[in-house]
Image (cartoon, rainbow, N blue to C red):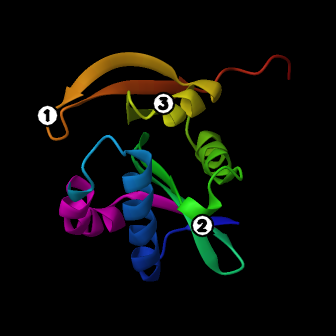
Amino acid sequence: MIRTFKIGDLTDIMKIWLESNIKAHDFIDAGYWRGNYEIVKEMLPKATIFVYEENGEIQGFVGLTDNYIAGIFVDNKKQSKGIGKYLLNYVKQKYQALSLKVYKDNVRAVKFYQRENFDIKEELFDEHTNEVEYVMSWEKRPTAGV
């Protein structure tokens, strides 16, 4: 089930945020993520967040600012079970267009977004991590027929 974030979810989603970032970005020192933990914890409640929950357990979430996906995060033990795709499809139903940034070396995520019809629009250099990232976007395509 997907639902809107509640402030009581913050501890659980921050745990998922930290652990999944460290796993997905093994090319970035884990200290970078730990060092940003408190800043993200303060900023997250200001974003639009949808939580994927099953049997009362938060298994993933997507965070957005307007139509920009700040990230899709899935509990490391629950990855590759379709939760990320489910969250992405949920926000695709709510928005006409979406954009995001993803590190070039996060090959698994780049391929995921390309499979989901996101296009690479630009390549940037992230000075905080010294890594190249892609700006990717998606637009709802009109359906044929009525």
- Name the spot of residue 9 as percent of width and height, x first: 47, 77
Direction from residue 67 to residue 28 in the image, left or right? left
Which residue is identified by label 1? 127
**Mark 2 vs 1: CB contact within 8 A:** no
Please say whether residue 31 is visible from this viewpoint. Answer: yes
- Name the spot of residue 146 as percent of width and height, x first: 85, 23
Badge 2 density bin: few <14, some 14–19, many ≥20, Cα 10 Å: many
Distance from the alpha carbon under mark 2 to that under mark 3: 22 Å
> Going 44% across and 83% down the picture, which residue do you hit?
8
| Rendered view: 84 above or below 6 | above
> Going 18% across and 61% down the picture, which residue do you hit?
35
Direction from residue 5 to residue 140 in the image, left or right? right
Q: Is residue 40 magenta?
A: yes
- Tag of residue 30: none
Distance from the alpha carbon under mark 2 to that under mark 1: 31 Å
| Rendered view: 66 above or below 143 | below
Direction from residue 13 to residue 89 in the image, left or right? right
Which residue is identified by label 3? 107
